[in-house]
Amino acid sequence: MPVTIDLSGSVAVVTGGTRGVGAGITRALLDAGAEVVTCARRAPDKPVGAAGRTARFLPVDLRDPAAVADFFGRVRDDHGRLDVLVNNAGGTPFRMLADGVAEQQARVVELNLVAPLTASLAAYEVMHRQSTGGSIIMIGSVSATRPSPGSAAYGAAKAGLDSLARSMAVEWAPLVRVNTLVPGMVRTELSHLHYGDEDGIASVGRTVPLGRLAEPSDIGDACVFLASERAAYISGASLLVHGGGERPAFLDAATANH
């Protein structure tokens, strides 16, 4: 018989869940039956929807601890519970370290490491009071485990996020599970800024063993799994969703010499 995941009756928050990877996560959770609340500093042009339902949007600056506490308090009061938090909001401009100043890099770390910590602490205050606990999912990056020229602070922050999740998983067990989902390259509405036109995107995709960039839905489906009872014994883990990673450069170099 087919294996399905039903999150009906659960309430999920997806930070930055209104576009790109975040919207893919939101749609996947909606498809699975969850009530979804998204948040960002600015409202989306149109609500994110799937399965005939739409996600609720509430504005919040994730770098403001008081605002974050109020946001999660409102989710609890309005929806009665909080079962899933996906810390997706983040990002960075491309900037070589020597071309910027420390304060610029610190803002990248604040958004990609401190803000998820702030949100997780506020979510924990709701989750640990529930008999069913909850699931927190950090959206990491392969940049955490490889050199990331042009986004060094981002990669460092994502490495810290993975470490943070493992410690949270120990401190907050057994009621709250905490895991990191580690995407590779994902095709979004902004892919052309990084990879060029369709030929460029296809060319980059061929460097991935599975032959393409991830779709936001690939990341969303993995989040649904980690949020569900199917992952009830998974905590403190890092789930790689990167299509097999990157083909080692030495293989191409060796081939070129023959």
Image: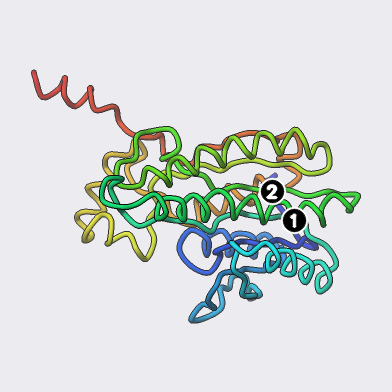
Residue tagged 1: 123
Q: Quadrant of the C terminus?
A: top left
**Residue 246: % across, % down:** 33, 34
Marks 2 and 1 close (CB-CB < 8 Å): yes
**Residue 22: % across, % down:** 53, 61
Q: 238 or 215: nearer the eye?
A: 238
Residue 101 placement, left or right of 221 = left
Residue tagged 2: 136
| Residue lying at 59% horizontally and 35% vertically, measured from the top left | 163
Residue 108 placement, left or right of 86 = left
* Element type at mark 1: helix
Q: Quadrant of the N terminus?
A: top right
Q: Quadrant of residue 86?
A: bottom right
Q: Earlier in the sequence, mark 2 or mark 1?
A: 1
| Residue lying at 59% horizontally and 70% vertically, measured from the top left | 50
Q: CA distance from mark 2 to mark 1?
A: 8 Å
Amino acid bearing label 2: Ile
Question: Is residue 167 shown above or below 8?
Answer: above
- Residue with the most extreme left position: 258
Residue 153 placement, left or right of 203 = right
* Element type at mark 2: strand
| Residue lying at 53% horizontally and 53% vertically, measured from the top left | 110
**Residue 220: % across, % down:** 56, 54
